[in-house]
Image: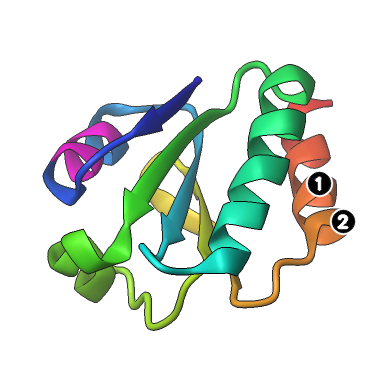
Amino acid sequence: MIKYINDEKLEKVLNENEKLIMVFGKGENCSVCHAIEDRINKTYPEKYKDLDIYYLTIEESPNFRGQHLIFTAPTLLLFDKNKEIHRESRIVDFSRMERILNIYFD
């Protein structure tokens, strides 16, 4: 599932969810963010059907950005039961991300 969400709703989802969740913090005028978003949209929903993916515009989400120390875009966060287990910022290493996802889903 892919969903665009604001920071208030995302905090509620993180607190209530027992699943693995990916949060993608992107910038409004970030060309790298758009490329990463396309790659996520084309790859992850089919490959990891139980992974919930939430997109968040960091300029519109100062509370989430501050609470989770997001200083740059793009930032990918993985949460398991409301605990951050992995972070990729600026330069996203998709092979590392997929290794971690494979550990959870295989």
Residue at 33 percent of width and 78 percent of height: 69
Packing grade of label 1 (10 A; few <14, some 14-19, many >=20) is some
Q: Residues within 10 Å of mark 2 (few under 14, many from 20)?
A: few
User: What segment is highlighted magenta in the picture?
Assistant: 9-13
> Badge 1 is on which residue?
98
**Between 60 and 85, which is closer to the camera in this rendering?**
60
In reply to whether residue 24 is colored magenta, the answer given is no
- Position of residue 42 measured from the top left corner of the image (x, y, whole percent): 73, 30
- What is the number of callouts on the image? 2
Does the image show residue 68? yes
Numbered badge on residue 95:
2
Determine the main secondary structure of the stretch shown in magenta.
helix
Of the residues shown, which amino acid type is indicated by label 1? Glu
**Drawn side of residue 68 relative to residue 51, left or right:** left
* 7 displayed left or right of 95: left
Give the colour scheme shown. rainbow
Mark 2 lies on a secondary structure that is helix
- Residue 81 or residue 40, whichever sits in front: 40
Residue 84 x %, y %? 46, 57
Q: Along the line of sight, which residue is nearer the eye, 65 or 84?
A: 65
Q: Is 91 displayed left or right of 65 in the figure?
A: right
| Quadrant location, the C terminus | top right
Decide: marks 1, 2 in contact (CB < 8 A)? yes
Task: Write the residue at 57% across / 54% down.
Answer: 34
Tell me where residue 18 sits by quadrant.
top left
Answer above or below: position of 90 versus 43.
below
In which quadrant of the rendered view does residue 26 lie? bottom left
